[in-house]
Amino acid sequence: MEQEPERVNRVNQIGEYMRKEFSALGFNIGQSVTPIVPIIIGDDNLTFAFWKALFEAGVFVNPIISPAVPAGMQLLRTSYMATHTDDQLNRVLEIFQKVGKQIGVI
């Protein structure tokens, strides 16, 4: 981090961009302020259905359900690296929007 501060800057820019865009699409991201952006779903079955549809569309996220989080706060954990490209990020957002609408999360 000390030797390549541009990577820290880039990953923080990505986190800010993804939080803004997920919110604009209508997703609940809670109080996230890092490049690890939660998409709060609030239901075990819906969380797993969303996770599976994203996975089948080529996007990997981690489903987090209770007891790891309180009931009603089940979520998909998205995380980013400084090496993700703008095209990759925008593709993820497109897929999230499509799947989110199909499943009824947004």
Image (tube, helix red, strand yellow):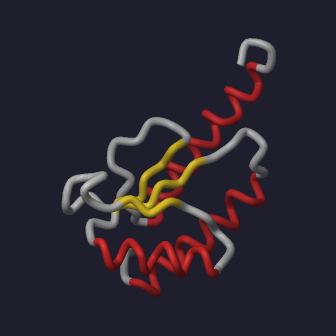
Q: Nearer the viewer, residue 17 or 55?
A: 55
Q: Quadrant of the N terminus?
A: top right
Q: Residue furthest bottom?
A: 102
Q: What percent of the width, then of the height, locates residue 80?
A: 63, 46
- In the image, what residue occupies the spot 38% across and 72% down? 47
71 up-or-down from 18: above or below: below
Rendered location of residue 93, percent (x, y): 60, 65
Q: Percent x, y for residue 2?
A: 73, 12
The image position of residue 62, as x and y in percent, is: 50, 60
Q: Residue at x 30, y 52 (%)?
A: 68
Q: Residue furthest top?
A: 2
The image quadrant of residue 92 is: bottom right
52 or 40: which is nearer to us? 52
Viewed as shown, does residue 54 lie left or right of 42? right
Q: Is residue 73 above or below residue 33?
A: below
Residue 67 in the figure: left or right of residue 30: left
Residue found at x 68% / y 62%: 90
